[in-house]
Image (cartoon, grey):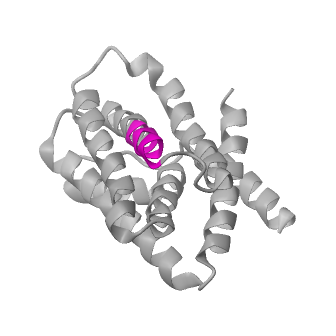
């Protein structure tokens, strides 16, 4: 297992900023989070976290992320003076993977309300990263990003729910690998 984690970290860590832009279309925006492994892994893990709670409670986790994401994407699309901070914001998106791995390791010792606030904050970070890359505040592009985010969260939920009866172990390993990849990529950006 350790060899798989190390190999995955080395293989994917250099690709964090290599995924293509949003394009000028709804479809380009829809594909952007799917093609960017840093965004994809973060959103899959958050979707998986729903399984750790009753559905009625757990579904609030990705909702908090999507709300933060939406607000920050709209705000970010209207900002021009933060373009010099894009590398710092991209580093923060990588850090979300590391923090998710730590949170998963703590295994529910963090209160649910604190977890909601953290995931809402992660949504703000990811939304700002995407919003700053937008050519302008275009509702179709932002809609594509939001729909893609919701689909990835849903995929994480389904993947974790039906992959194994011991989803806790699957989620734990997936989150650990994702966190390691994020840490390696983060180190490479410093």
The quarter of the rendered structure image containing the N terminus is: bottom right
x and y percentages locating residue 106 in the rendered image? 66, 50
The quarter of the rendered structure image containing the C terminus is: top right
Q: In this view, does 11 lie above or below 123?
A: below
In this picture, residue 188 sits left or right of residue 103 = right
Q: Residues in magenta? A: 112-121
x and y percentages locating residue 79 in the rendered image? 26, 21
Look at the image and tell me whether residue 65 can be seen. Answer: yes
Task: State the residue at coordinates (34%, 39%).
Answer: 127
Q: Was residue 44 drawn as part of the magenta stretch in this picture? A: no
x and y percentages locating residue 166 in the rendered image? 63, 80
Furthest-left residue in view? 139
Look at the image and tell me whether residue 12 can be seen. Answer: no
In this picture, residue 172 sits left or right of residue 126 = right
Furthest-right residue in view? 3
Task: State the residue at coordinates (73%, 54%).
Answer: 9
Task: State the residue at coordinates (21%, 55%).
Answer: 26
x and y percentages locating residue 161 in the rendered image? 49, 79
Q: In this view, does 173 lie above or below 103?
A: below
In this picture, residue 101 sits left or right of residue 29 = right
Residue 82: name its quadrant.
Answer: top left
Task: State the residue at coordinates (41%, 39%).
Answer: 117
Q: Is residue 98 above or below residue 132?
A: below
Furthest-top residue in view? 81
Q: Was residue 117 drawn as part of the magenta stretch in this picture? A: yes
Q: Is residue 49 above or below residue 97?
A: below
Residue 107: name its quadrant.
Answer: bottom right
């Amino acid at each position: 297992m350790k060899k798989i984690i190390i190999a995955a970290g080395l293989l994917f860590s250099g690709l964090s900023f290599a995924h293509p832009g949003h394009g000028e279309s709804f479809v380009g925006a829809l594909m952007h989070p799917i093609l960017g492994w840093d965004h994809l892994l973060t959103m899959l893990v958050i979707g998986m976290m729903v399984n750790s709670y009753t559905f009625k409670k757990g579904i609030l986790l990705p909702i908090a992320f999507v709300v933060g994401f939406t607000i920050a994407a709209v705000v970010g699309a209207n900002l021009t003076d933060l373009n010099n901070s894009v590398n710092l914001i991209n580093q923060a998106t990588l850090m979300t993977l590391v923090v998710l791995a730590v949170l998963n390791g703590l295994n529910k010792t963090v209160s649910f309300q604190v977890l909601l606030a953290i995931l809402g904050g992660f949504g703000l970070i990811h939304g700002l990263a995407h919003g700053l890359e937008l050519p302008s505040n275009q509702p179709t592009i932002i809609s594509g990003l939001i729909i893609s985010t919701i689909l990835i969260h849903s995929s994480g939920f389904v993947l974790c729910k039906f992959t194994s009866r011991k989803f806790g172990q699957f989620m734990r390993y997936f989150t650990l690998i994702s966190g390691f990849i994020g840490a390696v990529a983060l180190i490479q950006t410093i």
